[in-house]
Amino acid sequence: MSQILPILKAGSPLLYQQAKAVTFPLTPETLAHARHMIATLKNTDGLALAAPQVGIPLQMLVINIPQTAPAKRYDFSSDPDHKAFPLTVLVNPTLSHLSEEKIDGWESCLSFPGYRGKVSRHRSLQCDWFDLDGKPQSQKCDGFNARVIQHEFDHLHGTVYVERIKDFSTFTFI
Ligand code: NI
């Protein structure tokens, strides 16, 4: 059975704390967390969820980016090469080969509902992680998907996108 978990909102202390690395083999409790995170993400119009956002202080993400934008607040048009990133649980993700080039783009967050802001992110990167069986996985990403991964990676290290907005006049109601 999976549950829909409440999503922590701006001001919750867990959003600003470093999450712990997950150890393998996963405990039944951590596997249940992963199931609940999937159910919780599917219950929103969001594209990704980090464990700290649902009160779990572990380095675990769920990403589910479709080919076409699921809601108006997402603009895939700035990324003509956009490809889906199908439903994946990423345990202990790390980022490398971050491009020198950074691009500005809109971000929003389930923990800051109703708002968006412009953030500068690396255009491309490689993400390495472990799947739920403890097998290493790797994916090169660019554009919109690279942006989502950097946003989620930040959540695991206590940073929210709002802290990265340089021009605060872009922090706006959707
Ligand atoms: Ni977020």
Image (tube, rainbow, N blue to C red):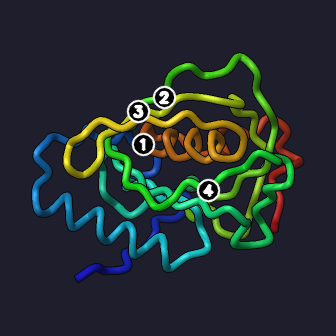
Q: Secondary structure at mark 2?
A: strand
Disc with the residue nearer the chain's start (4 vs 1): 4
Asked if the residue under mark 1 is in contact with the one under mark 2, i.e. CB atoms within 8 Å, the reply is no
Determine the quadrant in which ligand 1 lies. Answer: bottom right
On the image, numbered disc 2 is attached to which residue?
95
Q: What residue sits 89% from the left and 47% below the top?
A: 169
Foreground: 102 or 173?
Answer: 102
Q: CA distance from mark 3 to mark 2?
A: 7 Å
Q: CA distance from mark 1 to mark 3?
A: 14 Å
Say which of marks 2 and 1 sits in front.
2
Q: CA distance from mark 3 to mark 4?
A: 17 Å
- Give the quarter of the figure containing the C terminus: bottom right
Q: CA distance from mark 4 to mark 1?
A: 23 Å
Q: Which mark is residue 84?
A: 4
Q: What residue sits 62% from the left and 59% below the top?
A: 109
Q: Residue furthest top?
A: 100
Say which of marks 2 and 4 sits in front.
4
Is 46 situated left or right of 119 in this image? left
Q: Which mark is residue 156?
A: 1
Asked if the residue under mark 4 is in contact with the one under mark 2, i.e. CB atoms within 8 Å, the reply is no
Q: Secondary structure at mark 3?
A: strand
Q: Amino acid at mark 4?
A: Ala
On the image, numbered disc 3 is attached to which residue?
128
Disc with the residue nearer the chain's start (3 vs 2): 2
Q: Residue furthest right?
A: 169
Foreground: 37 or 7?
Answer: 37
Q: What residue sits 32% from the left and 71% below the top?
A: 36
Q: Quadrant of residue 53?
A: bottom left
Disc with the residue nearer the chain's start (1 vs 3): 3
Asked if the residue under mark 4 is in contact with the one under mark 3, i.e. CB atoms within 8 Å, the reply is no
Asked if the residue under mark 3 is in contact with the one under mark 1, i.e. CB atoms within 8 Å, the reply is no
